[in-house]
């Protein structure tokens, strides 16, 4: 039984239809188990699934400790407190972050615009569980979740190149995928 991208949105949709028990590929189990009120049963071989469904074998459901995920994966690699100088720019970013406003950084190369932008998420409010699940659904569908991180626990920072295509920015393409705008959600 092979892992599949997008397991979280699939399980959410099925849960919305009243299904409360799911057989999930073992590699996807931590991702699917972030949802509460449902049973996620890991399966690594079709034989296991048949035995479980026929009552021959009992497989314990898996539960992911969401609080532990936020504790261990809720840290940013860079922090806004590392910025020295740039008092006016820092103040503008703090006001934008506090009010949920947009900000445009403009200036000559080498003045610290990208460095400050990379640190901006560290002063934004922490993701709520609902926001984390919403963001994780997008990353799950894109196949961008790692096996060790079942839930996106930090606000995403995306830095697309200025030559990015329209499909890369807003999504789409021959094999439709979310674009950078969607990946930057929340």
Image (cartoon, grey):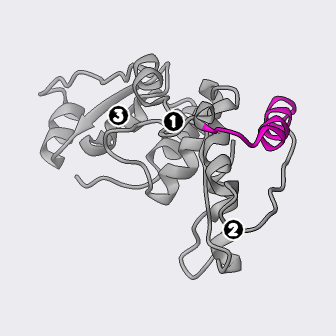
User: Range of the magenta residues?
Assistant: 83-100
Residue at the spot of label 1: 76
Could you say where residue 67 lies in the image, as x and y percent from the top left?
46, 17
Residue for point 86% across, 33% down: 95
Q: Secondary structure at mark 1?
A: loop
Q: In the rendering, which numbered label is found on residue 30?
A: 3
Tell me, yes or no, whether the two marked residues, 1 and 3, touch with CB atoms within 8 Å: no
Position of 168 relative to 134 (above/below):
below
CA separation, marks 3 and 2? 42 Å
Q: Nearer the viewer, residue 133 or 156?
A: 156
For residue 26, side relative to residue 126 (left or right): left
Could you say where residue 45 lies in the image, as x and y percent from the top left?
15, 47
Q: Nearer the viewer, residue 51 or 87?
A: 87
Residue 166 visible: yes
* Residue 22 on the magenta span: no
Position of 108 relative to 16 (above/below):
below
CA separation, marks 1 and 3? 22 Å
Pointer 3 or 2: first along the chain? 3
Pointer 1 or 3: first along the chain? 3
Could you say where residue 90 lies in the image, as x and y percent from the top left?
77, 38
Tell me, yes or no, whether the two marked residues, 3 and 2, touch with CB atoms within 8 Å: no
Q: In the rendering, which numbered label is found on residue 109?
A: 2
**The C terminus - image quarter:** top right
Q: Nearer the viewer, residue 38 or 179?
A: 179
Q: Residues within 10 Å of mark 3 (few under 14, many from 20)?
A: many
């Amino acid at each position: 039984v092979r892992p599949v991208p997008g397991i979280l949105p699939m399980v959410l949709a099925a849960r919305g239809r009243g299904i409360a028990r799911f057989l999930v590929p073992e590699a996807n189990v931590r991702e699917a188990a972030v949802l509460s009120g449902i049973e996620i049963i890991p399966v690594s071989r079709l034989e296991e699934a048949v035995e479980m469904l026929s009552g021959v074998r009992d497989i314990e459901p898996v539960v992911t400790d969401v609080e532990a995920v936020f504790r261990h994966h809720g840290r940013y690699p860079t922090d806004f407190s590392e910025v020295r100088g740039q008092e006016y720019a820092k103040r503008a970013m703090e006001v934008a972050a506090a009010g949920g406003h947009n900000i445009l950084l403009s200036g000559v190369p080498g003045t610290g615009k990208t460095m400050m932008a990379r640190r901006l998420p560290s002063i934004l409010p922490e993701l709520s569980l609902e926001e984390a699940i919403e963001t994780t659904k997008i990353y799950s569908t894109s196949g961008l979740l790692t096996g060790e991180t079942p839930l996106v626990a930090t606000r995403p920072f995306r830095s697309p190149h200025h030559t990015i295509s329209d499909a890369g920015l807003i999504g789409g393409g021959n094999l439709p995928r979310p674009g950078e705008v969607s990946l930057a959600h929340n």
